[in-house]
Amino acid sequence: MFKYLISIDPLGLMYGSAGAFLSPENLVGRSGAKFPPDAATLAGLMFSINKINKEYSQEILRDNLYVTGPFWAKLNNKQNFFVPIPWHKIIAKKGTREWEIKNNEWYLDKNLEKLEPDYRWQTITSWETAAQELNKPKNKPDKIADNPWKFVSFLHPKIQTTQRCTEDANGLFLENSVQIPDDVCLVYLSNYPIENGWYKFGGENHIVEISCDKLNLRIIDILNQKIGKSFALITPGIWGSNRISHRQPHHNNFPETMQMLTDKPVPYRYRSQGTLGRGRYAVPAGSVYVLKEPINKPWWEWDETWFPKEGYSLKKVGCGLCLPVEIQGVN
């Protein structure tokens, strides 16, 4: 199981783009914006560091390293980090709504006032009692939150060819950077530690300060919950083969998905041993699944064959990490 909480504290801006290149004729907003960096970014950093320090052999890390995220936390309370709110919960400043299952279909009472979510994250410890804890958002400002970061775009003129730009004198590269409040850090989980220090993380040579702490036992217990018949992703999920992506695992020993509540897919790509991996689309974090039969074991014990394998299993980069949810109408 995950043993360490790794926090990322930016020393200035962070890179917030999926890598889209914008020409002078095509400077459009935040094209390609993607933040926070996936857990694979941390895994790649740990492999690179170990090549120098050689605390563990590359074979040990390749076969045994597991990381997951991204999450975020307040610097003064890193262990109680924020995870995505499941999509069946609509939590707004005016109140809350919940999707439920009626007649084997998703149902939301249309007679009630329509709400748009104002909050996208909740603390990991509030997951255990989410229905009671989050039903009055005005009274729970410390347990729910929206994205704490802001995108800041700026132009780099005449960047070298090796940094993804043309040699044209008018060539411009628009960097989608992210500004994070001073009291906020990104959070990832790992079963191997990383040495505290300053590192380049997330693209464009931005520097961050990384700290590694042992993961609180209470958090480990939450992550070790059996999944049951309904669950929500707290990290992006990629299912299928290394060539085809699906919305859910397609294996004989994985229960049939009866209902699913999700948003549009998100781009996903990772590097393996210096090689750029295949571009994929992932089911976004917060997506909710309702299964025909329960999975009576936590995500950590899921069959690794349920996950695509590109060099190594995507389970090792926290693909589809999930927690059980209670949905009205699901027995």
Image: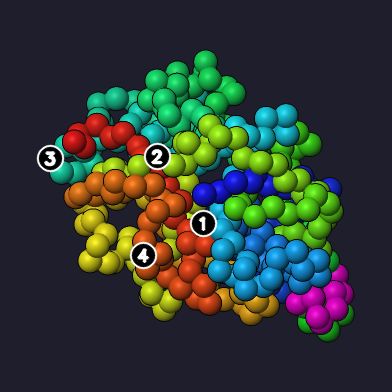
* Amino acid type indicated by mark 1: Gly
Labelled disc at residue 292: none
What residue do we see at 75% from left, 77% from top? 164
What residue do we see at 49% from left, 21% from top? 137
Q: Is residue 302 left or right of 218 when viewed as pictured?
A: left
Residue 267 seen in this snapshot: no
Marks 1 and 4 in Cβ contact (< 8 Å): no
Image depth: mark 1 or mark 3 in front = 1
Query: On the image, numbered disc 2 is attached to which residue?
Result: 225
Q: Disc 4 versus disc 3: distance between alpha carbons? A: 29 Å
Q: Disc 2 versus disc 4: distance between alpha carbons? A: 19 Å
Q: Is residue 52 left or right of 214 when viewed as pictured?
A: right
Labelled disc at residue 318: 1
- Looking at the picture, tell me which residue is in the foreground, 226 or 292: 226
Image depth: mark 4 or mark 3 in front = 4
Query: Neighbour class for label 2 at 10 Å: few (<14), some, many (≥20)?
Result: some
Q: Which region shows up in magenta? A: 157-164
Q: Secondary structure at mark 4?
A: helix
What residue do we see at 36% from left, 61% from top? 303
Labelled disc at residue 103: 3
Query: On the image, numbered disc 4 is attached to which residue?
Result: 306
Q: Is residue 65 above or below residue 244?
A: above
